[in-house]
Image: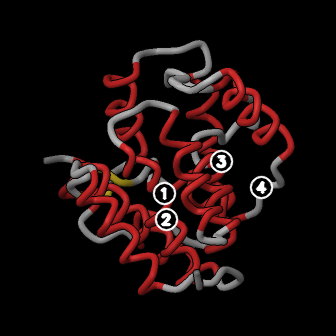
Amino acid sequence: MEFNEQNVEGALKEAAQSNPGKWVDHSRYVAKACKNIALRCGHLCANEAYMLGLLHDIGRYAGVSSEKHLIDGYRYCMEKGWEKAAQICISHAFMIQDISTSIGEFDVSHEEYLFMKEFVAHAVYDDYDRLVQLCDSLAMPTGFCLLEKRFVDVTIRYGVHPVTIDRWKKIIEIKTLFEKEMGCSIYTLLPGVEENSFC
């Protein structure tokens, strides 16, 4: 299936009907953040960034799950021939390329776990992977937010893990890289971030 905005929007709409939830609005804000930052960067395609953001959690179409949504999303996108989107369905959760840095539960088979372990270890990340990793930490279902608000939101839901601080540091490192390239704060590109962060 062609990787275009119409098909991707349709996929998210179907997924939302299959498993409605806050993840859908979160995905839309992630996509908007990806697009806005890509537009400012110049070397990234804003439409592609938007679509990759929309699809990063598409595996949630299969129902409520923890890390299973990563491989469900990978398979979903691979079946459609969307290879980069498939990679990001997994890579967005591993800003540190090590399966042991997961903060979720591996509600998958042993074979699926081994596949994900090898995939994460050997994936070649580019700025689209890093952009979605960053924007995943800038979006609540209600809108854009400061990284710190999203960090706390995720930690309340998933708990504190030995890798929590390292994951935060990696996202802040990615934020710094994009800001250096753009010459501005990422927050200037996220309408409503102040209101949503302090509401």
Q: Amino acid at mark 1?
A: Cys
Q: CA distance from mark 1 to mark 3?
A: 13 Å
Q: Is residue 39 above or below residue 144?
A: below
Residues at discs 1 and 2 in contact (Cβ within 8 Å)? yes
What amino acid type is highlighted by mark number 4?
Answer: Tyr
Count of numbered badges drawn on the protein: 4
Crowding near pointer 1: few (<14 within 10 Å), some, many (20+)? many
**Of the image marks 3 and 4, the number of the one nearer the N terminus:** 3
The location of residue 37, given as percent across then percent down, is: 52, 73
Q: Is residue 175 visible?
A: no
What residue sits right under mark 4 in the picture? 125
Judging by the rendered image, the residue that carries numbered circle 1 is 135
Q: Amino acid at mark 2?
A: Gly
First-in-chain label (1 vs 3): 3
Front in this rendered view, residue 156 or 15: 15
Contact between marks 3 and 4 (CB within 8 A): the answer is yes
Disc 1 vs disc 4: which is toward the camera? 4
